Image (spheres, grey):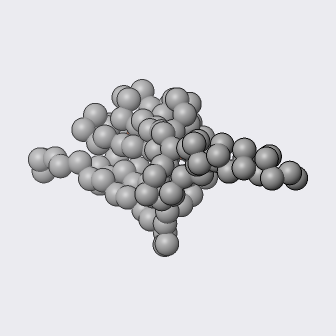
Amino acid sequence: MSWFSISALVTRSALHRPATRLYPFERRTPYAKTRGHIEFKINDCTFCTVCAVKCPTGAIVASKKDKTWAIDHGLCILCGNCVHDCREGCITQCREPWPPMRAKEVISYRQDYEAP
Ligand code: SF4
Ligand code: SF4
């Protein structure tokens, strides 16, 4: 490699943005169709358990009796079945990934209700 091509390479590298990012401080914006983590809103949930039955990995547990709904993010493979099968629109899939986990992470929700 000649001195001229080396200096051209150095100049080009100095004038362009770096090819890499300072991850995790600088993160790429997710693509429009990125399958991120599952989000849940309990207010409209009827606890029909369809999402739990359709989940291929058993990541969701829903109980009509206790009015609870839980998801194990370690088991979820982001297939989106639960999003499509919930008729109440309680489950959505956002574009951002779930933060890295060091241990099993089950998020539980409970709907408040008046005792009969
Ligand atoms: S999230 Fe939707 S599919 Fe799952 S139990 Fe609630 S209403 Fe049924
Ligand atoms: S996205 Fe798929 S694996 Fe994850 S909770 Fe929903 S149905 Fe289960």
Q: Which image quadrant is residue 17 in?
A: top right
* Residue in the picture at 29% in, 42% down: 42
In this rendering, would 43 be left or right of 1?
Answer: left
Residue with the most extreme right position: 1
In this rendering, would 115 be left or right of 95?
Answer: left
Q: Nearer the viewer, residue 23 or 32?
A: 23
Residue 74 can be seen in this image: yes
**Residue 113 image point, x, y percent:** 16, 47
* Residue in the picture at 31% in, 40% down: 41
In this rendering, would 92 be left or right of 82?
Answer: left
* Residue in the picture at 13% in, 50% down: 115
Q: Which image quadrant is residue 79 in?
A: top right
Residue with the most extreme top position: 87
* Residue in the picture at 51% in, 39% down: 30
Name above or below for residue 87 compared with residue 3: above
**Residue 31 image point, x, y percent:** 54, 34
Q: Nearer the viewer, residue 1 or 25?
A: 1
Q: Nearer the viewer, residue 9 or 32?
A: 9
Name above or below for residue 109 compared with residue 28: below
Residue 77 can be seen in this image: no
**Residue 48 image point, x, y percent:** 40, 38
Q: Nearer the viewer, residue 21 or 97?
A: 21
